[in-house]
Image (cartoon, grey):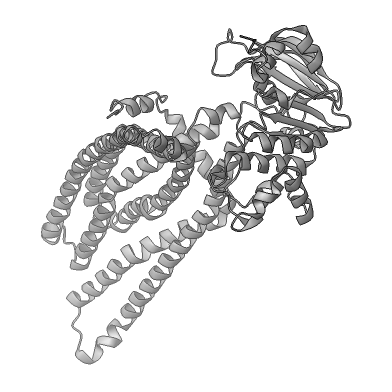
Amino acid sequence: MDVPPTDQSSQRVGRKAPRKVSVVLRTLYFYWQATRPQGAMFALSVLATLGFVFFLSFGNPYVVALIIDKVTTTTVAPSEVFEVFGPYILLLIGVNVLGQVSSKLQDYSVWKLEIRANYLLATRAFDTLSNQSMTFHSNRFGGSLVSQTQKFMSGYAMLMENLIYAVIPVVMTAVFTVMMLVGTVPLYVGILVALLIIYVTVAYLMYKRVLPLNSTAAAAQNALSGELSDSITNIQAVKTYGREAYERGLFDAANRDVVRADSIRMRASTVRGAVTSAIIVVIMMLVVVFITGGNAWFGISAGTLVMMFSYTYALTMQFNRINLMFQQINRGFGDAHDMTLVLDEPTLVADVPDAAELAVTRGEIACEDLTFWYADAEEESKVFRDFSLFIPAGQRLGLVGRSGSGKTTLTTLLLRLSNLQGGRILIDGQDIAQVSQVSLRQQIAYVPQEPLLFHRTVRENIAYGCPAATEEQIREAALKANALEFIEQLPHGFETITGERGVKLSGGQRQRVAIARAILADRPILVLDEATSALDSESERLIQEALRNLMEGRTSIVVAHRLSTIASLDRIIVLHEGRVVEDGTHAELVAAGGEYAYLWSRQTGAYLTDE
């Protein structure tokens, strides 16, 4: 059984850059940006929390203390109970009503706040990911990005709920305790405050030690999601090559990383909890001593002793939750860590300020002194060095060359999916680096080698580049792409769901749907990158005429290994290591006897000489 080494995922996780404190501040910044538009709702949640803590945790014991003092100092006849204690009873009822109203307002406002903020956070994450370059996406698992987005949103909910239900109650419980008792038992309050300061200091120092562990645990979870996504996305390759055990080994290695990271975090959190719990025990010892000797030593009334116990007990219960509170805050920041880095990552391909809209009237393309290498490659590994090419408006140009010669890269640069390091590309005299990317791509119909289909209906996939298309126009495009016949034979015709990445369709069917999309888009510039590579010979023959009609009057760039696809084009150039080594018509290049003639002979069988 071919099982990968168990530390492979560990190494992948270990390559992450070390967590910086500034990431926490940036996370808070993004969360505040989502909270600020809901300022009124946030203020309501804070005020409701104050009311909840004051009325239920302090109002109740205070009224009860007044009743106890009344009972111990006044003799009340049975007939006088409601007369004497009626105001106290009404006060107690009022305090509880206000406390419960505050509690419900607290729940409502937090829930409402999270719903609105999650919408803004999800939108920010989607906009960032969708506007990032193809280089960015090619270096990341799609599943990990989805996981990071979900964790980023759940991190907000975790932090907001801890702020409203834990942090503010803890702080205000301490403040209210001091305010209510300092005038009566100042010595007790002084000792209590000193112990609380020690508690908070210890908890914070241990919190700082645990915080990086949460980032590591979140990274391990994201790596696990990435492994799962990668295997499921390529499940056909896994099954056809019998590699289930290998993929399970990769997943198990990532899963063990999660267990390892969570275990380390758990042990650190448990130690922190034990230390802080010991301080809570000391605080309760203090309150027991004061309650038992308070009347004898300081003449403290019974009602006040009850208040002291109630307030201190409420305070210790709140502080006892600090361990869990810090653990969840740690986890929230850890979950948000990776997406925060993504949100702060510079966009490799960005529009210039006030980018103009591209206006295409002719479709003339000029590449001037292009210099380009991929962002993750060395400068010495240049794809293009001072590369120039002029394509007149309406010309149908074929790109030929061996793998790695720069054919697809040239179309990528024309679509501005990557930025040039030098030179420029002009369309009708307009530098594509100075126009908006959306306006550029809305002028180009692109059909790649691997059809890009959504998990949507056939109709939606064909109309993707022209959402306002009529039923008749969609059917006409499908007919021209030789796709109508097979579409009508699908279980639900145009309403058939294609599956993720079009998995329910054959390769040729997917390609014809993609070509139908390009036909319907009807754009002045057409880019076909091996667009007929997945078609059988009969389908290719049937679609050639449709493609010729589609290219008529449009500037067309056709990348092809199958040279029969481009033999009838106006012009063919042959690329080799980023340079144009041949340029001419099919007949001219065959007659020249160069690289193109060699490739043509191999594909047509002309290289088979008489034996």
Looking at the image, residue 145 sits to the left or right of residue 369; the answer is: left
Near-viewer residue (460 or 596): 596
Query: Which quarter of the picture shows residue 237?
Result: top left
Near-viewer residue (517 or 104): 517
- Quadrant including the C terminus: top right
In the rendered image, the vertical position of residue 1 relative to residue 492, given as above or below: above
Q: Position of residue 442 (x, y in %)?
A: 76, 37
Looking at the image, residue 557 sits to the left or right of residue 496; the answer is: right
Query: Which quarter of the picture shows residue 297?
Result: bottom left
Q: Residue furthest right?
A: 361
In the rendered image, the vertical position of residue 447 relative to residue 58, given as above or below: above
- Quadrant including the N terminus: top left
In the rendered image, the vertical position of residue 165 relative to residue 352, given as above or below: below
Q: Residue furthest bottom?
A: 79
Q: Position of residue 578 (x, y in %)?
A: 67, 12
Asked whether residue 419 appears in the rendered view, the answer is no
Near-viewer residue (173 or 222): 222
What residue lies at 19% left-to-right and 63% top-to-bottom?
305
Q: Position of residue 167 (x, y in %)?
A: 37, 49
What residue lies at 77% left-to-right and 7% top-to-bottom?
592
Q: Residue furthest front?
A: 611
Q: Position of residue 153 (x, y in %)?
A: 47, 47
Near-viewer residue (68 or 491): 491
Looking at the image, residue 433 sits to the left or right of residue 230; the answer is: right
What residue lies at 40% left-to-right and 25% top-to-bottom?
18
Q: How many marks?
A: 0
